[in-house]
Image (cartoon, helix red, strand yellow):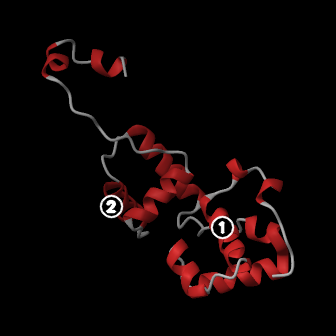
């Protein structure tokens, strides 16, 4: 670890947790902590620490800060995605599991609940947990509660 760098050179508030952990790992290595100690402090495994060390040696601080994660591509075609959007805009589904079932029945494409949730976020949809209605709100005009939300 011949190179030195300072966190003050970067805006700390912009650092993501993973990036901060990468930098902390390198700083701890430079201060003489063993891999076992760093693993215990940062809750990382040896392979991850070795990857951070290699990344820092090859690409420096910018390599540590880069986020190269791309995720997997959507399993649905463009036309299927458009059709799914139309379905979601016309009908309210309570769970991602229900949407998985719809996609399977309609397109014969399997999704896990987690995979569907990620796909829905990527498509701009969000999950809103329904709240409980109080007795007073049910006694008023039925549509009034929802208009005020």
- Find the residue positioned furthest to the top: 140
> Circle 2 sits in a helix, a strand or a loop, which is it?
helix
Which residue is found at the position 49% from the left and 45% from the top? 125
Which residue is found at the position 32% from the left and 51% from the top? 95
- Horizontal side of 87 relative to 57 (left or right) equals left
Image quadrant containing the C terminus: top left
- Name the residue beneath numbered marker 1: 70
For residue 117, which quarter of the picture? bottom left
> Circle 1 sits in a helix, a strand or a loop, which is it?
loop
Q: Position of residue 121 (x, y in %)?
A: 51, 51
- Horizontal side of 53 relative to 149 (left or right) equals right
Which residue is found at the position 57% from the left and 62% from the top? 77
Q: Position of residue 76 (x, y in %)?
A: 53, 63
- Name the residue beneath numbered marker 2: 101
Residue closer to the observer: 112 or 101: 112
Q: Position of residue 33 (x, y in %)?
A: 64, 81
The disc label shown at residue 117, or none: none
Crowd class of label 2 (few under 14; some 14 to 19; many from 20; radius 10 Å): some
- Horizontal side of 146 relative to 51 (left or right) equals left
For residue 62, which quarter of the picture? bottom right
Residue closer to the observer: 133 or 14: 14
Crowd class of label 1 (few under 14; some 14 to 19; many from 20; radius 10 Å): few
- Horizontal side of 4 relative to 43 (left or right) equals right
Image quadrant containing the N terminus: bottom right
Which of label 2 and label 1 is nearer to you? 1
Residue closer to the observer: 54 or 92: 54
The answer to which of marks 2 and 1 sits earlier in the sequence is: 1
Q: How many angstroms separate mark 2 from mark 1 (CA)? A: 26 Å
Count the labels in the image: 2
Q: Position of residue 103 (x, y in %)?
A: 40, 60
């Amino acid at each position: 670890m011949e190179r030195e760098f300072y966190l003050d050179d970067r805006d700390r508030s912009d650092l993501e947790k993973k990036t901060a952990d990468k930098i902390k790992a390198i700083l701890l290595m430079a201060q003489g902590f063993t891999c076992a100690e760093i693993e215990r402090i940062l809750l990382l495994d040896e392979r991850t620490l070795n990857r951070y060390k290699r990344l820092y040696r090859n690409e420096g601080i910018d390599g540590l800060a880069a986020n190269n994660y791309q995720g997997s591509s959507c399993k649905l075609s463009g036309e299927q995605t458009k059709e799914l959007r139309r379905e979601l805009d016309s009908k309210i589904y309570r769970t991602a599991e229900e949407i998985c079932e719809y996609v399977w029945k309609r397109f014969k494409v399997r999704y896990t609940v987690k995979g569907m949730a990620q796909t829905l976020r990527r498509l701009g949809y969000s999950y809103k947990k329904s709240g409980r209605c109080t007795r007073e709100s049910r006694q008023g005009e039925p549509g009034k509660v929802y208009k005020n939300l």
